[in-house]
Amino acid sequence: MSGFLLRLAGPMQSWGERSAFDMRDTAAFPTRSGLLGLLACVLGRSRGESLDDLAQLSFTIRIDRPGVRMVDYQTTGGALPVRGPKVPTADGKGRPNSKGTLQTWREYLADAVFIVAVTGPDEVLDRARAGLRRPRWQPFLGRRSCPPDAPLLLDRLVSDPIAELRAGVPLARRVREGADVEVDFLTPTGRVDEVHSEIHDVPITFATVDRAYRPRPVWRHTESLDPALGVRDLRDYPARLADYVRGETA
């Protein structure tokens, strides 16, 4: 199975699902629209450009650390006179009947770590991997204020990236010797008898105005992994990760 591995880690991440101006939410995990947007960004794709090639990719997510949900309170428009210019909106027309200060709340995941196996057609994977190696634009973790920690791309040749999630990539988690390590996975497909949820994160268009998404099912399950994938001390994790990547660099 062809593919590559992404490591999504940083001080903050935000993967909006039902965002509105006054409440910018975040899902508990990277959304499909957010991951496609990240790849479109490193490839230099403008909003409105076709994503038909990237839409062929599939994402399997290992949740190393779910992070802590935080909310940032902001205001805008307080300096604008009531009868003067309106608070600007995405379409450039301004919010009607603006009366001074508007409040907004923005959700983030702090200290989260996700490992993503990206699979799909070889030509699309090669294009995406090249963009990650030399990004046209700065990648971000769902929102421009959320830059990723390095490495973003685990640039190592793997024959089966999903198998690497289970037995290869070091866990960003401290484990006790001999203890079972229960890790959650999110998969794009599953059995009909398995528990799954629905999320509106399949982009129909990334246009600046009137963005549109359709729903898809998400399967979540827990697996017991080898404790050797974890670390006794989180300070050892960067070196373990670097050793993993150097094992067979592409």
Image (spheres, rainbow, N blue to C red):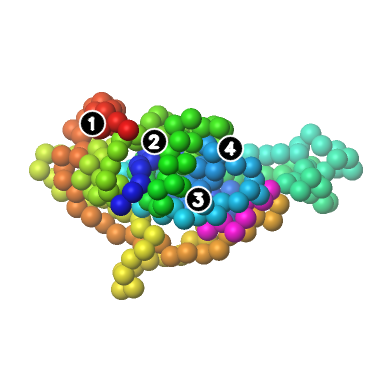
Q: Considering only order in the chain, which callout, 1 or 2, is on the residue closer to the N terminus?
A: 2
Residue drawn at the location 26% of the way across and 28% of the way down: 246
Question: Circle 1 sits on which residue?
Answer: 247
Decide: few, some or many residues near mark 1? Use Cα within 10 Å; few <14, some 14-19, many ≥20.
few
Q: Amino acid at mark 1?
A: Gly
Distance Cα–Cα, label 1 vs label 4: 30 Å
Q: Amino acid at mark 3?
A: Leu
Distance Cα–Cα, label 1 vs label 3: 28 Å
Question: Circle 2 sits on which residue?
Answer: 153
Distance Cα–Cα, label 2 vs label 3: 17 Å
Residue drawn at the location 38% of the way across and 51% of the way down: 119
Residue found at the far bottom of this picture: 193
Which label sits on residue 166?
none
Q: Considering only order in the chain, which callout, 4 or 1, is on the residue closer to the N terminus?
A: 4
Decide: few, some or many residues near mark 3? Use Cα within 10 Å; few <14, some 14-19, many ≥20.
some
Determine whether label 2 and label 1 are within 8 Å by CB. Answer: no
Please say whether residue 46 is visible from this viewpoint.
yes
Q: Considering only order in the chain, which callout, 3 or 2, is on the residue closer to the N terminus?
A: 3
Q: Nearer the viewer, residue 201 or 159?
A: 159
Q: Amino acid at mark 2?
A: Leu
Question: Circle 4 sits on which residue?
Answer: 44
Residue drawn at the location 48% of the way across and 61% of the way down: 199
- Residue 242 percent coordinates (x, y): 28, 28
Reply yes or no: does residue 203 show up in magenta.
Answer: yes
Determine whether label 4 and label 3 are within 8 Å by CB. Answer: no
Secondary structure, mark 2, is: strand
